[in-house]
Image (spheres, rainbow, N blue to C red):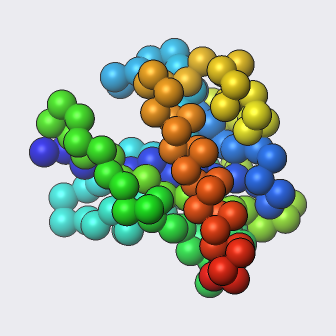
Amino acid sequence: MKKYTLVFLFNFDLSEIILQFKTRGTHPNKWCVPGGKIEIGETPYIGAPREMFEETDLTKDDLAHLHNNLYALADIDFHLDNFKLYSFYGILKEGKTFNQKEDEELKWFKVYEVLHGFVNTVGSGELEFLIRLALKEIQYRKEKNSL
């Protein structure tokens, strides 16, 4: 079974998210969050920051909150057609942004634009569902002071 990571990266005030325009793969010509294949012998917790760096030039040092961690998104993973997706999210430090490293375009989008269908994203609402879930989890962690 192939394993992949998705990395939801929000700006500091959670009003924007980084999306990547996919030109190849299972969803060409659509926007998705950065991520990619987990390599043999790699865990999702190693693969997610590696993919984040490869695609955005961002490291865990660029993330705000709780020792610069990426958080597993409610330990949710999707099993779809012989592959498994592991979702993570992070909040960038104030003023941080990405550097284009690969040939697939990266762009900041307003979260409300994505959630209200103004952006041509992969899937049939799954990406939007995961964004909502990440925002709810961030709010919960903030209320519990665990961010």
Residue 55 shows in this picture: no
Which quadrant holds the C terminus? bottom right
Q: Position of residue 12 (x, y in %)?
A: 80, 60
Which of the two residues, 115 or 44, is positioned nearer the viewer here? 115
Please say whether residue 31 is visible from this viewpoint: yes
Q: Quadrant of residue 138?
A: bottom right
- Image coordinates of residue 143 in percent, x first then y, are 71, 75
Residue lying at 56% horizontally and 35% vertically, measured from the top left: 128
In the rendered image, the vertical position of residue 15 relative to residue 67, given as above or below: above
In depth, the one of 53 and 136 nearer the eye is 136
Pinpoint residue 51: horizontal percent, then vertical percent: 45, 54
Q: Quadrant of the N terminus?
A: top left
Residue at the (70%, 44%) spot, across then down: 17
Residue 55, x across and y down, in percent:
54, 47
Q: Is residue 43 left or right of residue 75?
A: left
Residue at the spot 18% in from the left edge and 58% down from the top edge: 40
**Quadrant assignment, res 26:** top left
**In front: 146, or 3?**
146
Number of numbered discs on residues: 0
Depicted 6 relative to depicted 49: above or below: above
